[in-house]
């Protein structure tokens, strides 16, 4: 019986790798079952099994070869996870493509291969593939920008989240077409896209490609923050803390920083730690400061380096 990715069985690390290897060599290839095993292996890598030795180091390359076999065998849903994995510096193997790239090349082999995967996903109707192509293509927008816009164009007609217009705006901006960028961001914002709202805040605040307009910048910032955009929440907090554009109110700033931290902004969590150390807008509380520093570190922020810059140290 052919198993779907959702019904692929669990297996010990070594046995799972051996099963992936066996399936890749089998005739005929059971691509759906192989993809399911690769998704399980990917999940184990994400949880750290390779880092602590439960999986051997070759698990990364086995995973990429497995995803490649499944994708080349017609599993269109394997293209996006394959592209993501090809960007992992621990992966030393890249596919040999049977046909030329549909866009100009010239970047690194990893970048070009990942872009190819996302383009393939988009070609098979995966919207996320088109968005990831545009996002990754920012590193080579002079070469791949036109193809990104080609992938995004059919998605803009039915764009309920505004994401296709948002990424179109990003690509147009990077290619120097500010007017088109603003028009796409406005369409995305009208669909409720908080990323586009934040971009409009930045553009109006800096006067980049549009006349500077502090009131418009503030309005777009608050609209993005109202949708829990992490950077928008942080900027509102910082504005209250500094009194720039908002009434200076450290207690209000602390509340906004907490919302930003809850939305995943690591710097907001670190800033709250400092506020609790100093008693700025909140009661002095070394325990809560330590808790916010720990949270910031869990989100990838270099707390100790930042505190050193501030001439401070963690509470003992």
Image (cartoon, helix red, strand yellow):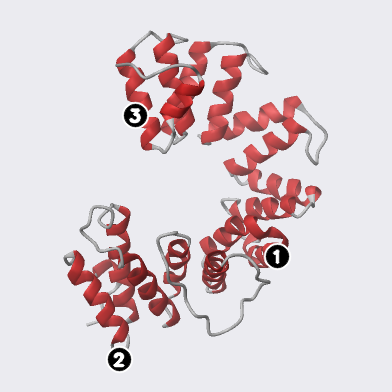
- Between marks 2 and 1, how big is the CA–CA gap? 39 Å
Answer with the quarter of the image where residue 132 lies. Answer: bottom right
Labels 2 and 1: the sequence-earlier one: 2
**Separation of marks 3 and 2 at Cα, in angstroms:** 51 Å
Return the residue at label 3: 294
**Which residue is more in the foreground, 133 or 310?**
310
Q: Residue at x 53, y 64 (%)?
A: 129
Gap between marks 1 and 3 measured at Cα:
41 Å
Residue 6: x, y in percent? 28, 67
Q: Residues within 10 Å of mark 1 (few under 14, many from 20)?
A: some
Kindly give the residue lying farthest to the bottom in the view shown: 27
Q: Residue furthest right?
A: 211
Q: Give 186 or 87, whichever is nearer the viewer.
A: 87
Please give left or right for residue 221 compared with residue 314 in the image.
Answer: right
Tell me which corner region of the image, top left, top right, bottom left or bottom right, holds residue 18.
Answer: bottom left
- Give whichever of 86, 32 is nearer the camera: 86
Residue at x-position 78% and y-position 38%? 208
From the image, tell me which residue sits under label 1.
143
Query: Is residue 4 shown above or below 201?
Result: below
- Determine the secondary structure under disc 1: helix
Q: Which residue is mark 2?
A: 27
């Amino acid at each position: 019986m052919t198993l779907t990715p959702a019904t692929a069985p669990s297996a010990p690390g070594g046995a799972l790798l051996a099963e992936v290897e066996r399936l890749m060599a089998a005739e005929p290839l059971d691509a759906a079952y192989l993809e399911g095993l690769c998704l399980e292996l990917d999940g184990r890598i994400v949880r750290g099994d390779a880092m602590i030795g439960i999986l051997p180091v070759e698990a990364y390359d086995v995973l990429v070869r497995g995803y490649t076999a499944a994708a080349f065998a017609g599993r269109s849903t394997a293209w996006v996870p394959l592209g993501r994995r090809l960007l992992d510096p621990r992966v030393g193997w890249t596919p040999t493509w049977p046909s030329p790239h549909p866009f100009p090349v010239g970047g690194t082999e990893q970048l070009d291969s990942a872009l190819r995967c996302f383009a393939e996903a988009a070609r098979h109707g995966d919207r996320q593939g088109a968005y990831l192509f545009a996002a990754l293509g920012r590193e080579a927008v002079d070469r791949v920008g036109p193809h990104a816009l080609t992938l995004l164009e059919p998605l803009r007609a039915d764009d309920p989240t505004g994401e296709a217009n948002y990424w179109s705006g990003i690509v147009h901006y990077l290619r120097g077409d500010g007017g088109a960028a603003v028009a796409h961001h406005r369409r995305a914002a009208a669909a409720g896209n908080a990323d586009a709202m934040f971009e409009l805040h930045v553009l109006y605040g800096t006067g980049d490609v549009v006349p500077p307009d502090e009131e418009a910048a503030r309005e777009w910032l608050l609209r993005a923050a109202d949708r829990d955009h992490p950077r928008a929440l942080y900027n509102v907090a910082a504005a209250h803390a500094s009194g720039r554009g908002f009434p200076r109110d450290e207690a209000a700033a602390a509340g906004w920083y907490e919302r930003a931290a809850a939305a995943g902004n690591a710097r907001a969590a670190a800033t709250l730690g400092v506020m609790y150390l100093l008693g700025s807008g909140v009661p002095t509380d070394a325990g809560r400061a330590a808790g916010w520093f720990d949270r910031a570190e869990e989100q990838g922020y270099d707390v100790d380096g930042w505190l050193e810059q501030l001439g401070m140290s963690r509470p003992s």
